[in-house]
Image (tube, helix red, strand yellow):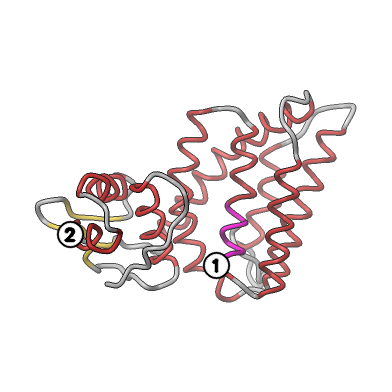
Amino acid sequence: MTIDASGKDVAISDMIGDRIAQMIATGQLHSGDRVTEQELVDTFGCSRVPAREALKVLHAQGILTGGRHRGFRVGEFGPQKSRTVLDVRLALETLQVRAAVDNWRAGLSSMDPLDRALESMAVAVEAGDMGEVLRCDLMFHRVIAEAANNDLALTLWNTMARYVLILFNLARYGDVDLNIVLQRHRTFRDRLAAEVASETPGHDAAALLAEHYLAARQPGVAVPLN
């Protein structure tokens, strides 16, 4: 296994965990591949503590299997897991969309970060950069999760984001027109803005999200699960 040691200005263990998830998503790591503590130490130039913590968290999230004494391996990411993650994500984000719309309407947070995520996504689409489009996709949904101002729900969402990165990149992103991804997010943003501006609140968060996500379950629709 060869790991790209580039990372962002985040906690070392989180950066390591994100890089491993990215490598699984892009096919650099495959189900059953070993991931060792010593290799992480050598690659990232870190101590054993953050390397061990990254492995422990990825194992707790189900992304790695095995254990410290038996060795860690990349888990399986099949259709059943994809369906389960989508169902859980839909339920969690329904709560977050409801709270975010209420907070935007009350002026407690701004929708500007959504627009910035879309601007970044448009640049990535123009460049044909699938990985960056997916990162912007997650950024877009993280903005909603943060606007909900629910720390517990945000923690759960962040945990699930690595699964989303892996599963939906492997399952869908290689086969779609990235312009469709961008358009669906712009449409979703406009629907949210309309709800915020409405003088008669009564948004159905589940319906908004279903419209955004579930078209991919329809035969012949070439759109991703995001």
* 154 in relation to 79, above or below: above
> Circle 1 is placed at which residue position?
131
Q: Is residue 139 magenta?
A: no
The magenta segment: 132-138
Foreground residue among 127 and 85: 127
Q: Which mark is residue 180?
A: none
> Which residue does the image show at 33% across and 47% down from the upper left?
13
> Which residue does the image show at 72% across and 25% down from the upper left?
108
Q: Element type at marker 1?
A: helix
Measured as percent of width and height from the top left, residue 176 is found at 63, 73
Spot the residue most to the right. 199
Foreground residue among 84 and 109: 109
**Hey, what amino acid is under mark 2?**
Gln
Disc number lying in front (1 or 2):
2
Q: Which mark is residue 38?
A: 2
Is 2 displayed left or right of 177 in the figure?
Answer: left
